Amino acid sequence: MKLISVIVPCYNEEEVFETSYKRLTEVLTSLYRYDYELIFVNDGSKDKTIELLKNAVLNDPKVKAINFSRNFGHQIAITAGLDNCKGDAAIVIDADLQDPPKAIIEMVEKWEQGFDVVYGKRRERAGESTFKLVTAKWFYRFINRLSDVDIPLDTGDFRLMDRKALDQFLSMRELYRFVRGMVAWVGFNQTFVEYDRDVRFAGTTKYPLKKMLNLASDAILSFSNVPLKIASFLGFITSAFAFIGILYALYMRLFTHNYEPGWTMLMLAVLMIGGIILIVLGIIGGYIGRIYGEIKKRPLYIINDKLGFDK
């Protein structure tokens, strides 16, 4: 009997944990042709999530838990769960129930048809602000324009991966992770299932604007060198304007008597060139910072303890 592993990253999910666990168990039990393991990754929660996890592990042999030493982030929590799963296929789903567990059934059906990766594609996104809907829509289209990898539009991390694709994903140990982009990069035979995203069942979002911007930055700098090309382009444009300005100043000085010393042109030139230099340095610094983070070779995460894996 094949094994399906379900990975659920958790950060302060005490309000939704019991309902999430119940719904996932109901769906996975209905897949009677498969055995399953349910792996919760506690990403440094400050509430009672760890106590709820311990209780679930004690009462259900299918449940396993990984407890981090601190908060390492959502993308790292997903990676830890995938590192420790044994399934012939692995499914990633958040605990907040915005992605419906019942969609797992359709994902498994697609896997049975021979697809190696099945990702969830959102038709509707209930309960989200207009700002988030618009920025999410344009972000995916923007990153696809920049990247050489075709990252599926309107998707999250909710997806199924066959062991073949999963092993290739796990071979990539980069620190700054954009999981949905990395899964797209490995290739293989990929498809999707569509669903309507629900309102968060309880609690608050774990992706405020700051984290969304950090994720967007990781996505762009990890999958595209276009910002570096833009920096070079700005440098050439600035040099061209500066050269034209020099020719104009020489002409006015040597061939006319209509020049007057002044500060306007000088200040505009200094401010423009200075601003572009700072932009270029910021872009280059973003890439250098990632190189610095990678060469330190620190572990992606530190596990405080693992529960239920010895069953």
Image: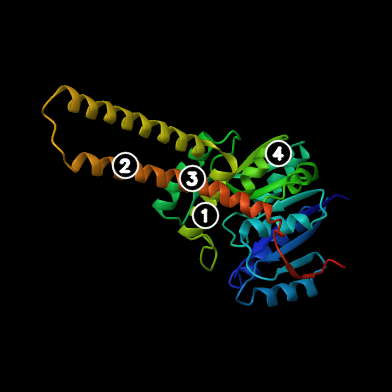
Q: Which of marks 2 and 3 precedes in the sequence?
A: 2
Distance between the Cα atoms at labels 3 and 1? Answer: 14 Å
Please report contact status of discs 2 and 4: CB closer than 8 Å, yes or no.
no
Q: Any mark on residue 186, and which?
A: 4
Q: Residue furthest front?
A: 254
Residue 175 vs residue 65: left or right?
left
Amino acid type assigned to the residue bearing label 4 in the image: Val
Q: Which of marks 1 and 3 precedes in the sequence?
A: 1
Residue at 28% x, 30% y: name it.
246
Residue at 61% x, 73% y: name it.
14
Question: Could you tell me residue 75's position as x and y percent?
Answer: 63, 55
**In this figure, which residue is indicated by the disc labeled 2?**
272
Q: Which of marks 3 and 4 precedes in the sequence?
A: 4
Helix, strand, or loop for circle 2? helix
Amino acid type assigned to the residue bearing label 3 in the image: Ile
Colour scheme of the rendered structure: rainbow
The residue closer to the viewer here, 299 or 56, is: 299
**In this figure, which residue is indicated by the disc labeled 1?**
214
The residue closer to the viewer here, 273 or 103, is: 273
Instruction: Classify 10 Å Cα crowding around label 4: few (below 14), some (14-19), many (20 and above).
Output: some
The residue closer to the viewer here, 207 or 35, is: 207
Helix, strand, or loop for circle 1? helix
Instruction: Classify 10 Å Cα crowding around label 2: few (below 14), some (14-19), many (20 and above).
Output: few
Quarter holding residue 63? bottom right
Q: Residue furthest top?
A: 255
